[in-house]
Image (tube, coloured by chain):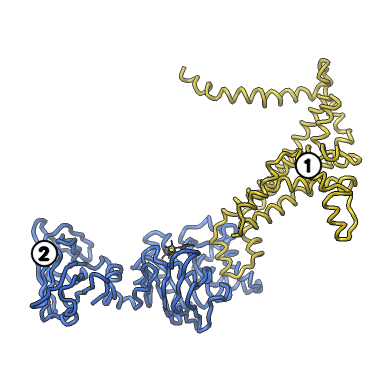
Chain colours: A yellow, B blue
Amino acid sequence: MKKQIPYWLVSPYLLYFAVFVAFPVAFSVVLTFHSWNIISPMTFVGLDNYRRLFSDRLFWQAIYNTLRFLLVHIPLQIVVALALAEFLNQKIRGQAFFRGAFFLPVIVSGVVVTILWQQLLGFNAGILNRGLTALSLPRVAWLEEPGIAMYAIALMATWKNVGLYVILFLVGLQTVPVQYYEAADMEGATAWQKFRYITLPMINPTIFMVVVLSTIGGFSLFIEPYIMTEGGPLNSTLSAVMYIYKQAFQYYHMGYSATLGFFFALLILGVVAIQKRYVEQEN
Amino acid sequence: MAEVKLVHVAKAYENGPRVIRDATITVQDREFLVLVGPSGCGKSTLLRMIAGLEDITDGDLLIDGKRMNDVPPKDRDIAMVFQNYALYPHMTVYENMAFGLKLAGLPKDDIRQRVSRAAHLLEIDALLNRKPKDMSGGQRQRVAIGRAIVRNPKVFLFDEPLSNLDAKLRVQTRIELQKLHRELNATIIYVTHDQVEAMTLGDRIVVLRDGDVVQQDTPINLYNQPATQFVAGFIGTPPMNFVPGRLSETGPLHFTSKGGQVQIDLSNSQPEARLQAHRGKPITFGIRAEHLSEQPPAARSVHEQALAVEAVENMGNETLVYCPIDTGQLIARLPAGYATTFGQPIRLFWNLDKAHFFDAQTGQAI
Ligand SMILES: Nc1ncnc2c1ncn2[C@@H]1O[C@H](COP(=O)(O)OP(=O)(O)O)[C@@H](O)[C@H]1O
Ligand SMILES: [Mg+2]
């Protein structure tokens, strides 16, 4: 009897895990070998879904789009977050206000933020273009130009999420003992040298965490292009998750969508593993 | 040449009270000066003002006659060894020592030469490729000193550098610091709360208490002529014995302890003249443990009294005898091998020529 008690205690979580994690994962693995449109019964298709995946140009374009997004989003996120964290780490007036202000977009719904930015990025009346006009510069087709739209979205996603990473960096900065800076002051280090030779190496773990979190977060890019551009123009902002979503809930290719999702998860895992390898070598 | 001068220096942290009130100290060229005092008295604050890590609220800091209040730390030609060493954890010993030189833009060969010379001097040649976390406290401490040495500064500042070492290593490092001071030929300002460290290392000692300089002098003068009861109690092990009491108002000069157990005749004694002005007033009588003896000392005036024995500490080279009295306790330092039968009182001779007297209100020596 006594031996059973622990099992009873963990059973609520086990139940949750079974229903919402284990079962969906197992079910989607099963799905990858089937064709299924939700209504008619599943039919076994073997490796057909996988074969199709490798020749699906649109899927690879979506992966490529997502990587393009990450290439801008991650460095921008780190640089801006670190700069803001350094700024907020100084003794400045209104510190609490700024900390709150930068965090606000994080908790505002993504849909709201996206609609807001749609206005800001508008070609004719958007604030950004009005600013450019005021400076006698040509207007930019932020969301209408295939070569630009994804980067405009990266800019917006950075604005939305940066507050979270500012907090992480702030915590990281505050763990660096002040003595190191004082010792460096005695040796004549400039502000930049202190940042380069003391701060950066010492917050390395935080930088890695931010890289991983924003990689995972960036790979799941969906709301922004879905609302702002619907993947256009010319599929230039079609993200991988958005394509998987479309396969499932617009075309009802449940089996194929599961295959894409499965493959995509492995891809993310691979990228993070490489990042981890790289950081461990640095140390 | 490096003479460091503090002139009426005061310090208040942001909106706080003054933690250093009015310090005037001159550190001579190549002097080993020790700032000593209990924890929280402002030693680190004073040192950090000299280093330039804290602003000076009031007064002047002069190095070789030049006012340094507004000169950034790196231009003061000063190196500091921090209490917890502050070695950069991600750099090797070599990189730690070379860091400041690299920032200063010295040629690589020059840096290598300086680092290896300092490493040799401190016997840490074998550690140059280690990271701080792979070294013992004593080794880290050497590296921290090495980092200061390579820059060849005019003045070295040490903030309690031995406090993280175990007792044995502390004694050994103390001796090495003395040696180092001779070899470097530099001015050293050294902070500690340990009076033994202060006595053994300092050419001169500055005693601080609650942000005030109480006395500055050579170790031997501090020991023999403490300016206040605080200094008398702080310097020396065991601490000086104190007996609070009062001087007689009239008649022959006479000291009576608070409970009346100690009665000392001071007429015709050496301090008699000084004490006349304090007749009838409360004073504290002070005498060091070595000035209480079993045999009558060769002295002008001696007090003799039998006391009970509470405890005996046999140190091998000497014996400390603890005697309870009405106002507390007396410790006598007797020769080695002194044996007592407990319950038997001991006759002690008090060498009054060596006695100290303090104003009970102000603590000032009389
Ligand atoms: N950064 C600071 N801000 C405010 N008060 C401080 C600061 N540093 C030290 N103090 C205060 O100044 C006094 C002297 O401190 P410190 O110089 O560190 O003493 P010590 O080194 O002799 O132990 C203490 O009362 C301490 O609380
Ligand atoms: Mg201190």
Name the element at disc 1: helix
> Which residue: 64% across, 74% down?
B106
- Badge 2 residue CB within 8 Å of ligand 1: no
Could you tell me residue B35's position as x and y percent?
Answer: 40, 71
Q: Amino acid at mark 1?
A: Thr
Residue A72 appears in the picture as rendered: yes
From what the image shows, is residue A169 above or below residue B59?
Answer: above
Judging by the rendered image, the residue that carries numbered circle 2 is B261
Name the element at disc 2: loop
Judging by the rendered image, the residue that carries numbered circle 1 is A114
Q: Amino acid at mark 2?
A: Gln
Task: Please indicate whether residue B304 sits to the left or right of residue A193 in the image.
Answer: left
Could you tell me residue B334's position as x and y percent?
Answer: 17, 67
Residue A148 appears in the picture as rendered: no
Report the Cα–Cα distance between label 1 and label 2.
90 Å
Of residues A122 and B111, which is closer to you in this image? Answer: A122
Of residues B155 and B135, which is closer to you in this image? Answer: B155
From what the image shows, is residue A210 above or below residue B361?
Answer: above
Q: Residue furthest top?
A: A41
**Circle 2 crowding by C-alpha within 10 Å: few under 14, some 14–19, many from 20:** few
Could you tell me residue A272's position as x and y percent?
Answer: 71, 42
Q: Chain of mark 2?
A: B
Of residues A222 and B51, which is closer to you in this image? Answer: A222
> Which residue: 70% across, 47% down?
A211
Task: Please indicate whether residue A153 sits to the left or right of residue A92 in the image.
Answer: right
Report the number of numbered marks. 2
Q: Quadrant of residue A55?
A: top right
